[in-house]
Amino acid sequence: MRNAPTPQPCDVSDFNRKLAERFGMNRFDGPNVRCVWGDTATEVQPDSTERLTYFRRMGPRMLVGTFKRGRLIIPRYEQHPLGVERFVVEKFKAPETLPAADRQRFPRGRYVFLYEVETTLAHDTTQGQYRPPGDDTLEHVAQILAGQDEADRALDRELERMSMEFERNWDDNAAGRNAPYRGAQVR
């Protein structure tokens, strides 16, 4: 059982360059889409500390030494957070598209999960063999982004339809056309 993060198994700078060429850069001079190693990818928090973006679990407690306090010998343990041992493709989200609480935390936007690159051994990473992202991954990312864009357009159309229906109902209510019939008002 491992206690420390697994180092990135291969260089993905060429793949990140291809992502930047295909999907462009954001207004903060970062790529719109990027690839990171999930076990070591970190995100800066509001208090300027970093934490794992793809936290999975804590590693086992490992004895790293002892210290003496009077007559007592006290063991000292260390435990490291462990992330996902995969390459992860992330998409940039501009600050104005984030929820209000996140806009305060991430005034320059943030990267969110988009796609996880599978390993060569059908999820078995015990041999340490990882599939580097390639052109097929680039195509998968393009398809995912196209699907998200279509879903966003469909949502926009539905919201527009609902807004128009609300306005029609509002006008009908104001004109008295939607007033409920309560029968004759005889006293």
Image: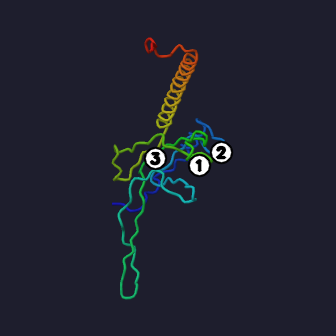
17 versus 5 height, above or below: above
Q: Nearer the viewer, mark 3 or mark 2?
A: 2
4 versus 163 height, above or below: below
Residue at the spot 38% in from the left edge and 62% down from the top edge: 3
Q: 44 or 145, which is in the foreground?
A: 44
Q: Nearer the viewer, mark 1 or mark 3?
A: 1
Give the spatial CA distance, label 2 vs label 1.
Answer: 15 Å
**Mark 3 sits on what residue?**
87
Residue 112 in picture, x, y percent from top left: 51, 43
**Mark 1 sits on what residue?**
106
Residue at the spot 66% in from the left edge and 41% down from the top edge: 27
Residue 160 in picture, x, y percent from top left: 56, 23
Residue that extends furthest to the front in the rendered view of this protein:
187
185 versus 130 height, above or below: above
Q: Are marks 1 and 3 in contact (CB under 8 Å)?
A: no
Give SS at disc 2: loop
Q: 84 or 171, which is in the foreground?
A: 171
**Mark 2 sits on what residue?**
29
